[in-house]
Structure formats: C-alpha cells, structure tokens
Amino acid sequence: MKAAKWREMSGEELSQKAKELTEELFNLRFQLSMGVAKNPSRVGRARRDLARVQTVLRQRQQDKKG
C-alpha cells in the first residue's frame, strides 16, 4: 500500500494495522523457518508496510510536539 493511503487512516487504525503486521511478520518468519511458507516474498512486503506505518505514526507524533 502506498504511503498516501496510510496517511489517510486515523491514528487508531494505524496502531491496529501495525499490530496486525507485526503478528503477520512473526508468523511468516516462523513459516519460513519451518519451510512451509507459501509466499516468501510476503515477508519483505510486510516489513515495508510495517515500516511505512511506523513512519507515518512517528511523523504525526512529531507534528504534535512541534
């Protein structure tokens, strides 16, 4: 998902999405270690999405302070 779409979401939605992505990333890494991952490229996509969510949340936090 593009960063612009993440910015349209509310802070609560972003926090929930970050939690979901963290869990998904854990599960994907576990599947990779077991050798049963159906789509290994999803790990990279989940990492990037999580980084985007965290970036948007951090930017909003900075805007409130400054």
Image (spheres, grey):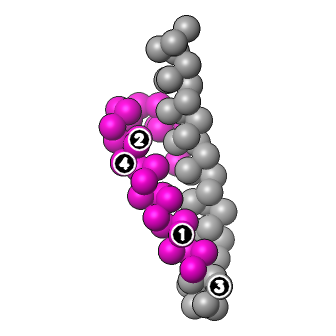
Instruction: Name which residue lies at 55% across and 40% down.
Output: 54
Mark with earlier residue (3, 1): 1
Query: In the rendered view, does 10 fall on the left or right side of 52?
Result: left
Give the label, 2 or 3, closer to the camera. Answer: 3
Mark with earlier residue (2, 1): 2
The residues colored magenta run 1-30
Q: Compute the Cα span from label 2 to label 3.
A: 28 Å
Count of marks, rendered view = 4
Q: Amino acid at mark 3?
A: Ser
Q: Nearer the viewer, residue 56 or 1?
A: 56
Mark with earlier residue (2, 3): 2
Q: Compute the Cα span from label 2 to label 4.
A: 5 Å
Q: Compute the Cα span from label 4 to label 1.
A: 16 Å
Residue hosting label 3: 33
Residue hosting label 2: 14
Residue hosting label 1: 26
Q: Nearer the viewer, residue 39 or 17?
A: 17
